């Protein structure tokens, strides 16, 4: 089972490494993958770290780290989405300004008096 976990972490790290991420994001992914590999190879290490941090069990510690990593990913997606939304709004505004046309004069139609006679 340990080899499957390590293989999955390596695949995830390689997949993320091929994407365009900032230096901090890449570093975070690499550190999380390395920590996962170390904790999979040396499960007693997670128990020792958990005891040091006053967490009940090593599995609880790994779970807490997984939740924190999930929150990091979710917040990263949220802020990236907001940046893209702002860029899209700016592009839409720029496009509207570039394609703006002067208002056309109203089309000459029947006068109001002629319409009133037609109603009578």
Image (tube, rainbow, N blue to C red):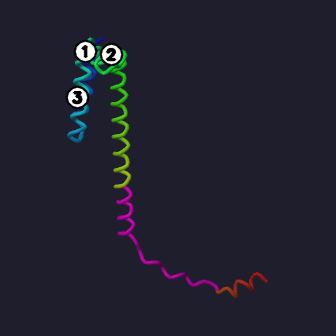
The residue located at (29%, 14%) in the rendering is: 47
Badge 2, how many Cα within 10 Å: few under 14, some, many 20+? some
Residue identifier under label 3: 31
Badge 1, how many Cα within 10 Å: few under 14, some, many 20+? some
How many angstroms separate mark 1 from mark 2 (CA)? 8 Å
Q: In which quarter of the view is residue 71 placed?
A: top left
What segment carries the magenta color?
88-110
Q: Answer whether residue 97 is magenta in the image.
A: yes
Residue 108: image x %, image y %?
57, 84
The residue located at (22%, 24%) in the rendering is: 34
Badge 3, how many Cα within 10 Å: few under 14, some, many 20+? few
Residue identifier under label 2: 58
Between discs 2 and 3, the one toward the N terminus = 3
Q: Return the residue nearer the eye: 46 or 55.
A: 55
Secondary element type, mark 3: helix
Residue identifier under label 1: 45
Cβ atoms at labels 1 and 2 below 8 Å apart: yes
Q: Is residue 68 above or below residue 5?
A: below
How many angstroms separate mark 3 from mark 1 (CA)? 16 Å
């Amino acid at each position: 089972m340990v080899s499957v976990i390590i293989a999955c972490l390596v695949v995830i790290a390689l997949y993320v490494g091929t994407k365009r991420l900032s230096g901090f994001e890449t570093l975070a992914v690499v550190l999380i993958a390395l920590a996962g590999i170390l904790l999979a190879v040396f499960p007693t290490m997670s128990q020792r770290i958990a005891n040091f941090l006053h967490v009940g069990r090593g599995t609880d510690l790994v779970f807490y780290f997984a939740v924190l990593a999930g929150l990091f990913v979710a917040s990263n997606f949220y802020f990236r989405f907001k940046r893209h939304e702002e860029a899209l709004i700016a592009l839409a505004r720029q496009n509207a300004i570039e394609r703006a046309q002067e208002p056309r004069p109203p089309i000459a139609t029947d006068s109001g008096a002629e319409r009133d006679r037609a109603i009578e």
